[in-house]
Every structure is written in C-alpha cells, then in structure tokens.
Image (cartoon, helix red, strand yellow):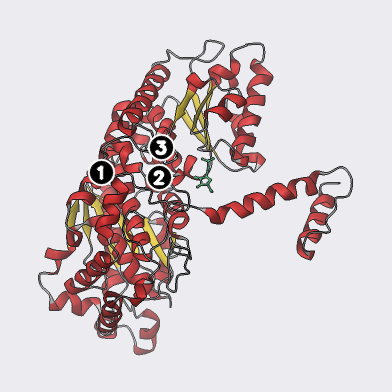
C-alpha cells in the first residue's frame, strides 16, 4: 500500500480511547454551556474554504475535540493518504486503481503519466473536444439529420452518470441557455424514457448516452429504446444515429458496437469513479447547458478545495474537519444518519447526489486488508431543501429520540425571483440552527406564560448539532467547491475507518440476480424455478400471471 494502512482497528488506538473519554465529558454538557464557557468559540470554529464559509460552532465540540480528532487522523496517516490520492497511487485497492478525480480540475500533483496515461494532457484534450461540441450545439451550427437545431438534450445514464449531471444542471439553471430543454433519464421503468418520447421531437433531440462501462442494463436499455425511436421517424437518413447520439464512456469498443461514431465519444478513465465523475466528460450535459466558460468556473471551484485540502493544516482544513465531525458523531455518539439541508430550491437534488457520493463510498464493512470493522462506518445521508423540510420532518430533528447531525447550506443572494424572499429563506435556515442548538427550556416557556402542564410537549431540548455552510451565491464555482468539500470529507472518513471508499462491490450481486431473473419472467413456457427460494418462486408466478404469461 502507498500509505501505511494496516488491518488495525482504529478502536485499538490510544487516540480513539482519548476521544471515547472526551465524548463522555461532552455528553455531560450542552451547546448553551459550550457557547457560554468559550467566548472565542467562533475564532477556531469558523473556517474559510475557497468561496465557502464553514461555521462549525454549533457542533458538540470544544476546541480540544478538534485537536483529538486531528490526532486520530494523524494516527490513521491521513496526510500520507491525501498525498497518495493526489499523486495517483493505487489507493482503490480492491480494483487496483488510482483515484484521480482531482486531476480533472488540475488539483492533483502528478509527476508523470499514471498507468500509461498522460493525465493532464488527456484531460485537457477531452475538455477541448467537449467545448467544441458545446459551442457547435449552442450556436446551432451542429444540427439534427434533417437540418433543424437541437431544442432538447436527453442525458441517458444512471448513478454517477446521471445524478451529478442532473443535480448540477438543475442547480445552475439560472446560468444556462434556457432555449434548449434538458432531460435526464435513468430509471429502467419504461415510463421514464416513454415520457421523453411524448414531449420531445426526434428531429430536434440529441441523446447523450453516459456510461462509464457502457454495460449498464438500465442505460443500454433506455439508449436502445431511444435509438429505435429516432430510427422509427428518421430512419431514412443514413446519419440519423450519428447526428442524434453522442456518448460518454471509458469503453470505446462498446460505444462503437452500439453504433455511435468514436468521433462523437468523449472518454474518461478507470481512475475516475462514477460518483466522482461529474467534472469529467460525464458533465457534458452540464457544459451543453451552461457553456464552456462557466463549466471551467465550475472546475475552478473544485480546484480551490483541492488546493485547500493539500495546503491547509489538518486543524483548519475544512473538508478534513467536516469528515472528522462525521466520524465523531458516527463513532462516539452512535448516530446513524446525517441530514443535508440546502436552503436553495436549485439544490433539490443535492442530497440525492450526496447519497451516492457518501453511501456508495463508505457503505463498507471490511477494511482495505479484508479484516472486518468493529465500529460504524458510512451513515445514511438524506435531506430536502429548506424550507419544505421544516414543514415535513424537522419535528423529529427537534424533539425526536434520534440524534441527527445536520449540515445547513445557506446563501446570501438569490438567483432570481423577489429579492426580499431571500431574507426570509435565510432567516428560516438560521433560525432552525439556533432552535436545534439552544432549544427552549422550561424557564423560558414559563416566562412566555406557557402553563406547566403544556411545558413537556413544548420543551425544545436543543443540543442538536449542525454545521452551517454559507456562500454568497450558488454560482458554478461555488457549486464545484461544495461538491469537492463533500468528496474530500468522504475520503477523510474512509481513511479513518481504513476502508476502500472507491469500490462498490455491494451493488454487483443485485445486478447479477436481476439478469438471472429476466428469463424467468419472460420465457414463453413455464420457467424452471427449482433453484429459487419460495418467496421468489411465488412472486415470479404472480408477476407472470398478472402479465398474462
Ligand atoms: O451502481 C453502481 C454503479 O457502478 C455506480 O457506481 C455507477 O455510477 C453506476 O453504476 C453507473 O455505471 P456506468 O456509468 O458504468 O453505467
């Protein structure tokens, strides 16, 4: 291994024991007292990370807590791990691959080719080709096979080949060319692609088929349906597929087998994981929407965080501290979930995007050397935009019996609409962090004239931790920074836990079993279900019956 990862459980380290002891002390106090006892609390808990301001003060921590967490990080060789990642070592051990999403935005520090790839040059070449295509489409120079300009772009992909492009395109809608509609199809549910056929015109629709492997069932099935749809109305034109399809993949052979001209293929590399690929050619739909210059600003936002990660001491390092706080709650407070609450309508898909980033990365139970963990790893990430969430699930955050740390993402400036509403939006987000932190006690309820018998129901326990991430405005640069902040937080957590945050073997079995089941559902005669369990046999039979088979 490039950095000294061992099969040793972090639980056996003295640094872990120190944190266990320290957590007992923190559990004896609360956020009201923590704020009162340290008037300089904001000095060490406010951090500038690129264009983002991080306020860690409403976490269940003292200054000393961060020191102890940083000591744990050192004991797990986090600084070496950061260098190993950024220099292209094979830190994705189970797939024997480098992990180089930072190179997509010039955030890596490579001294030569990686696995035979001159990374910097190839990244720039692909970007250049993406830019040429984007300019040609956005200027209507490149058109469909009947000569009409494109009015709709349909991204077909799933997981990392969908969530990033979709989330970012939605988030940056105000920076995009609104004359061209963007659609995203991921689900194999026939209604997903069917909806596209209803609202789009084949003559003016461009499909961007995105699949790292070009072997993913959902994507290929939807792409084949799209090809059929195009050919059904434009089949007389020999160049219909060539004009209406482009592909993003690492697998040139399968792309060309599908019928897409390699000229229309934009590549990336094995060392870019699907969930870390939004800033690669996978982001082609984003570039088509917002244009090449703004896409470069988006990359610049990532790069600012990469530089921060590389150059900032651990105890002031935003993504590292965010990751260490996740470890703090997960392992020393026993929390199981983490809410992410963007106060931005445009970030509606950000929690879903983060679910793949965090849960596919850190939902692991063995360490890199194959030994089993004896501590919690990845938490469940979830969330919805504020203020909608306030009227749905915040009740449980405030008064429920489960402790759920929450990240609040706030912006000073709106992107559109009546300006004054931003003040209300911001006030709501800030108010929630205050209510969660400081609650309302019986004395305050009494002062408000609340009768004694109602006080238990109206008591707000407070002491619920939040981190506030504040930025001026949701620009391409800020969004890039926000994503990179979480990418490196996930990495930090994985290093502490000693797991491989860059593989995803857990999703493979389901894929295999699905392909085994398809013939059972569709065969003309009765299938041989002898090898299946009773539940599967029953459900297959019911399905066949319902489908008249
Ligand atoms: O869900 C598993 C997964 O491999 C993800 O990691 C990936 O983002 C997604 O499938 C799609 O894969 P591909 O881009 O190869 O189609």
Please report contact status of discs 2 and 3: CB closer than 8 Å, yes or no. Answer: no
Cα gap from disc 2 to disc 3, whole angstroms: 16 Å
Please name which of the two marks, 3 or 1, marks the residue nearer to the observer.
3
Q: Secondary structure at mark 1?
A: loop
* Residue 331 rendering spot, x and y as whole percentages: 37, 73
Cβ of disc 2 within 8 Å of ligand 1? no
Secondary structure found at label 3: helix
Q: Which residue is mark 2?
A: 276
Res 452 quadrant in image: bottom left
Q: Which residue is mark 1?
A: 473
Ligand 1 within 8 Å of disc 1? The answer is no
- Mark 1 and mark 2 in contact (Cβ < 8 Å)? no
Quadrant of the snapshot with the N terminus: bottom left
In this view, which residue lies farthest toward the bottom? 452
Residue closer to the observer: 443 or 132: 132
Of 112 and 102, nearer the camera is 112
The disc, 2 or 3, on the residue closer to the chain's N-terminal end is 3
Of tags 2 and 1, the one toward the viewer is: 2
The residue closer to the viewer here, 204 or 484, is: 484
């Amino acid at each position: 291994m490039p950095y000294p990862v061992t099969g040793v459980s972090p639980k056996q380290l003295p640094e872990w024991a120190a944190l266990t002891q320290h957590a007992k002390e923190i559990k004896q106090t609360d956020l009201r007292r923590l704020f009162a006892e340290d008037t300089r609390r904001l000095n060490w808990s406010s951090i500038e990370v690129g264009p983002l301001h991080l306020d860690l003060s409403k976490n269940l921590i003292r200054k000393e807590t961060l020191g102890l967490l940083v000591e744990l990080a050192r004991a797990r060789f986090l600084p070496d791990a950061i260098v190993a990642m950024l220099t292209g070592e094979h830190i994705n051990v189970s797939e024997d691959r480098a992990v180089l999403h930072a190179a997509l935005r010039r955030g890596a520090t490579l001294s030569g080719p990686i696995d035979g790839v001159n990374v910097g040059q190839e990244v720039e070449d692909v970007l250049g080709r993406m830019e040429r295509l984007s300019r040609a489409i956005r200027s209507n120079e490149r058109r469909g096979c009947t000569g009409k300009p494109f009015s709709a772009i349909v991204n077909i992909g799933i997981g990392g080949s969908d969530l990033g492009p979709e989330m970012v395109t939605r988030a940056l809608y105000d920076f995009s060319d609104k004359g061209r509609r963007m659609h995203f199809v991921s689900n194999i549910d026939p209604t997903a692609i069917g909806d596209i056929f209803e609202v789009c015109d084949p003559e003016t629709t461009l499909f961007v088929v995105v699949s790292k492997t070009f072997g993913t069932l959902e994507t290929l099935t939807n792409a084949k349906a799209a090809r059929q749809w195009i050919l059904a109305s434009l089949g007389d034109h020999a160049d219909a597929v060539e004009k209406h399809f482009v592909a993003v993949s690492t697998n040139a052979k399968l792309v060309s087998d599908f019928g897409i001209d390699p000229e229309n293929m934009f590549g990336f590399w094995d060392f870019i994981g699907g969930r870390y690929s939004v800033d690669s050619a996978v982001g082609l739909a984003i570039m088509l929407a917002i244009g090449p210059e703004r896409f470069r600003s988006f990359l610049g936002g990532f790069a600012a965080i990469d530089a921060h990660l590389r150059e900032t001491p651990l105890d002031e390092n935003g993504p590292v501290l965010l990751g260490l706080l996740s470890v703090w709650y997960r392992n020393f407070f026993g929390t199981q979930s983490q809410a992410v609450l963007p106060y931005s309508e445009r970030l509606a898909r950000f929690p879903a995007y983060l679910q793949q980033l965090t849960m596919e990365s850190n939902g692991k139970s063995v360490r890199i050397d194959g030994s089993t963990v004896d501590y919690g790893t990845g938490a469940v990430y979830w969330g919805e935009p504020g203020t909608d969430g306030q009227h749905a699930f915040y009740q449980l955050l405030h008064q429920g019996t489960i402790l759920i740390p929450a990240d609040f993402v706030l912006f000073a400036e709106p992107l559109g609409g009546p300006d004054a509403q931003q003040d209300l939006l911001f006030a709501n987000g800030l108010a929630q962090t205050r209510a969660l932190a400081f609650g309302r006690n019986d004395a305050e309820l009494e002062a408000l004239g609340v009768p004694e018998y109602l006080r238990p129901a109206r008591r707000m326990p407070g002491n619920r931790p939040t981190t506030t991430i504040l930025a001026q405005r949701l620009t391409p640069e800020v969004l890039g920074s926000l994503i990179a902040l979480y990418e490196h937080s996930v990495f930090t957590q994985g290093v502490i836990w000693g797991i491989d945050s860059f593989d995803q073997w857990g999703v493979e079995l389901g894929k295999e079993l699905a392909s085994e089941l398809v013939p059972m559902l569709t065969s003309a005669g009765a299938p041989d279900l002898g090898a299946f369990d009773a539940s599967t046999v029953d459900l297959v039979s019911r399905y066949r019956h319902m489908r008249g088979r």
